[in-house]
Every structure is written in C-alpha cells, then in structure tokens.
C-alpha cells in the first residue's frame, strides 16, 4: 500500500479518506443484495492471522461492540504519526458480517501511516452505504473496531 | 395445514409436535421435490450468514431489517408483513419452516412475529442451522430453488394481545409467573448486556421484581436441539413450580432469547397463555420509576 508518508488522504467527492472513498464508491455502485454480496467478498478475503498471533490469541483485544466474537491487534513500525500501522483481525467464519467489517478496515487502513488512521473520521463507517443492508445497529460494531484500533495505535506510536 | 406434520417419534412427547420438524424430515421433503406449500425461512443473528450458504430453496428473513419497523420501536404493520410474505413466496396457506443460527433464537423470534400476524402453520427446524450443517446436509449459495414471489397475502392487523406483553401489562403482572431468561450476571445486575455482547444502552442493571431466573439455554441441548419434554418439565414445572394453566410472561434483553423460551413453554410444554415481553430489559432498565430488583433473589412486589 502506501509508504506511510504520502498525502493525508482526504480526497474524493464524499470527503472521505481516499482509501475509504474507493471502497464506498464500490458499495454505492451496487444495490440491495449485490451490495451484501460485496460485503461477503470482503468477508471471505479477510487475511488470516500471521502465525505469531494465530498461536497466541490471548494477545488480541476483543471488540465487545460487535455482536459476534472478533479480536484485533495492531503493530506500529516506527514511531509518531509517520509510523506505519499494521492491523490484524480474527473472527470465526460463522460471523461473516463482522469479518466483512474487519476486512474493509484492513483494506483501507493496513499499511497506512498512523496519522492517517488516527485522522479517519468516526463517521466513515456510516458512509459506506452499509446501514441499509446490514442495519445501523450492526454497523456499531465497525465503529467499535475503529475506535479500538485508534486507541492501540496512539499508545503504540507513543502519541 | 398444507404439508403433513413430521411424524418422528421423538417429537411426539411434546405438547404440540406439529410445531417442530427434524432435519431428516426436512431433508426428505427436499429430496422428494420440495412440496409446493412449503417455504423454508432462514433467520439469523448475522445478516450475512445466509449468503455464505443456506438450505436449498430457503428465503432469508432478517429480524432487524425485515421484521422491525425502521422508525418506531415496533414490528412491521400488516402491509409491511404482507409485502414481505409476497416477496418471500409465502401465501396465507403456506407451511413455513424457520431455522437459524444460535440455537434458533432468531428463528424462534421470527416464528413469534409470524404468529403475531396469525400465520397458521409456522414450524421450527429442531437444532437449526448448526444441526443441519453438523450432519453435513446440503447447503447452497444458489437462488435456483428459491420460491417465486407470490401476491395477495392478506393485510392482517397484528394481534399482539395473546402472545405479546407491554410494559404496563408487566407492571400489573408482578408477583405472577414471570421468567427472566437472560444470563445470571444480567439477572443479578452485575452487567446490563450478555457476556461478550455489545452494551445496548441500558442505564440500570437487575431484573423485574419477582421474576425467576431461567437462562434460555437451559432448554437447549448441546447440539442446539430442544431438550426432552421430561427435562423441560423438570425445569419449568419442577424447579419453578409453574403450571400450564396460569398465564406466564417471559422476557430477556430485546425479546429474542425469550422468544425461544416462549416457544418452549407454549409448544413443547403446552402452557396455555404465555406472552413475550419484547420491550424486555432494554425498556425496563431504562424506564423512569420502574421498580428493579438486584442480586440473585427474585425480590418482592413493590408496595407503593
């Protein structure tokens, strides 16, 4: 993805960070069941945990805002806002919605600079066009993940 | 009823065996060409689970997107339900078999909403999605066997009174047979939501005074199927001392787990009058001046 020092990434017509703007565009181009299908594609594409975490699930932080069990952990390469943020998620296959949310966050934010992730507005989860296909209540889980990611990164990047 | 009931002997001990079907019975129906008057409905907690693969021919009904009114905290009205039924290929005469994840919580909840509209023949698939999958039965992502939309489902006025309790009903009911089906921690007031579940904005913890605690899951076996009638009687009639002729009320957090218990009491044990208080703890725990009991004891009827 990016080298972490590029633009702050608030491009796009929707005023979304560029990484989310692209994803939002893809979702908005579809309607109803096709939109849900795209979320399922994301769900299926959620990267597996690297071995160092797969063997140590206790290192991951639970996200109780989600209806289904999901765990996440971040890594920071470097320090400060310019450091690179790495994101890792774990959620079981019987929780495809939650996996889909995690996969969107991974695609949009993994490998970006810590500053970019921290600047991601909380409203981003509501801008993807998902509320009407998964319900706003369920979407709260994605906001919960983003908040936890930001908190971990702030600590780990020494901000 | 348009489709014959499942004659499996194991079901016949229940008070209303016609409300349950076994995975084998359903598989046999599909193998025999899926009778015209039968529609299978999947209703899950996870809104994408159906898309990952479902029983061939099943249609999806989502508790939140399809059964709840998007604005008022209530269920859809008669027109909304009729529209959903038409789109799902369900007529007033259709036999509906509902199944879902999480030991059929949401399936039981969907079934209960179907009954608010007086749909005559709605049954649960015993064991739900997990049992079907565990037996390695066919799942598909294809829509091929999906029933074609129908038209003309009547616009029925929802009849809540017989099986749904409102807050005022419960307030008048304190001291009567009332069951809290949430986890022990939610009952005592230690926490206001399920373990590992999101906080859904309840400002007080505890339970409705005089409610007895029977977590819903006690009615489910390890494989997600319902426990035997004798085991269920030992809990609800034995332990609680409740009897089938006395009106009974169940509640949980939003009414989904208690729909499971409502099904058990009504159809497996033959309780004659059970209402689900779907406002449940998300309403009661936020209600101004409503009495609350904390700790492991049911508590007393408030005197004021």
Image (spheres, coloured by chain):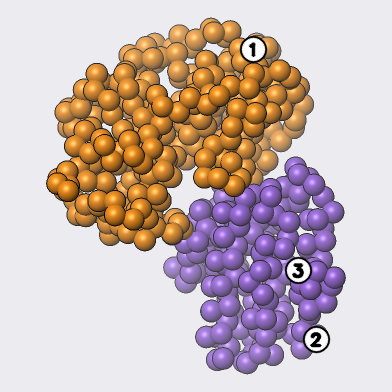
Q: Where in the figure is residue B252, as x and y percent of width and height?
A: 36, 43
What hue does chain A carry in this figure?
Answer: purple
Residue at position x 63%, y 71% from top? A122
Q: Around disc 1, counting alpha carbons within 10 Å, would you say few (fewer than 14), some (14 to 19), or many (20 or more)?
A: some
Q: Position of residue A1 (x, y in %)?
A: 78, 76
Tell me which chain the residue with mark 2 is part of.
A
Label 1–label 3 contact, CB within 8 A: no
Q: Which mark is residue A20?
A: 3
Note whether B224 is above or below A49 in the view shown: above
Q: Are marks 2 and 1 on the same chain?
A: no
Q: Residue at x 59, y 41 (%)?
A: B69
Secondary-structure class at tag 2: loop
Q: Disc 1 designates what residue?
A: B37
Outermost residue to the front: B304
Identify which residue is drawn at 61% across, 45% down: B70
Q: Label 2 to label 3, Cα distance in Å?
A: 16 Å
Q: Is residue B44 visible?
A: no
The relative height of residue A15 versus residue B122 in the rendered view (above or below) is below
Q: Secondary structure at mark 3?
A: helix
Q: Is residue A108 left or right of residue B196?
A: right
At which x and y percent is residue A49? 60, 65
- Label 1, label 3: how far apart the Cα atoms are: 46 Å
């Amino acid at each position: 993805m990016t080298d972490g020092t590029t633009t702050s990434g608030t491009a796009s017509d929707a005023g979304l960070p560029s990484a989310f703007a692209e994803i939002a565009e893809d979702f908005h181009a579809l309607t109803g069941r096709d939109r849900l299908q795209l979320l399922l594609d994301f769900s299926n594409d959620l990267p597996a945990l690297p071995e160092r975490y797969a063997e140590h699930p206790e290192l991951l932080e639970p996200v109780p805002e989600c209806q289904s069990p999901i765990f996440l952990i971040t890594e920071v390469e470097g320090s400060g806002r310019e450091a690179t943020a790495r994101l890792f998620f774990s959620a079981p296959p019987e929780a495809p919605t939650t996996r889909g949310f995690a996969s969107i966050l991974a695609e949009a934010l993994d490998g970006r600079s810590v500053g970019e992730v921290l600047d991601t507005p909380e409203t981003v989860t509501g801008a993807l066009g998902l509320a009407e296909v998964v319900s706003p209540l369920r979407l709260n889980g994605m906001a919960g993940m983003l908040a936890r990611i930001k908190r971990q990164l702030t600590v780990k990047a020494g901000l | 009823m348009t489709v014959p009931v499942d004659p499996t002997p194991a079901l016949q001990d229940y008070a209303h065996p016609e409300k349950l079907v076994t995975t084998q019975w359903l598989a046999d129906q599909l193998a025999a060409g899926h009778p015209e008057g039968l529609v299978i409905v999947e209703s899950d907690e996870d809104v994408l689970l159906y898309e990952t693969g479902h029983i061939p021919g099943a249609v999806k009904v989502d508790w939140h997107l399809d059964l709840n009114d998007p604005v008022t905290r209530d269920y859809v009205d008669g027109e909304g339900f009729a529209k959903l039924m038409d789109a799902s290929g369900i007529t007033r005469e259709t036999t509906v078999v509902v199944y879902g994840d999480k030991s059929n919580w949401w399936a039981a909840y969907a079934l209960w909403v179907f009954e608010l509209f007086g749909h005559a023949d709605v049954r649960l698939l015993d064991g739900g999605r997990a049992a079907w999958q565990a037996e390695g039965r066919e799942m598909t992502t294809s829509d091929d066997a999906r029933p074609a939309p129908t038209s003309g489902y009547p616009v029925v006025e929802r009849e809540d009174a017989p099986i749904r309790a409102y807050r005022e009903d419960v307030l008048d009911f304190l001291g009567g047979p009332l069951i809290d089906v949430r986890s022990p921690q939610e009952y005592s007031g230690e926490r206001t939501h399920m373990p590992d579940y999101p906080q859904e904005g309840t400002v007080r913890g505890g339970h409705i005074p005089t409610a007895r605690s029977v977590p819903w899951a006690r009615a489910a076996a390890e494989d997600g199927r319902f426990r035997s009638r004798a085991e269920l009687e030992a809990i609800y009639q034995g332990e609680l001392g409740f009897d089938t002729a006395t009106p009974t009320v169940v509640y949980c957090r939003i009414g989904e787990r208690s729909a499971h218990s409502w099904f058990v009491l009504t159809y497996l044990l033959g309780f004659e009058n059970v209402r689900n208080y779907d406002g449940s703890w998300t309403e009661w725990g936020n209600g101004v001046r409503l009495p609350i009991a904390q700790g492991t004891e049911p508590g007393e009827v408030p005197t004021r």
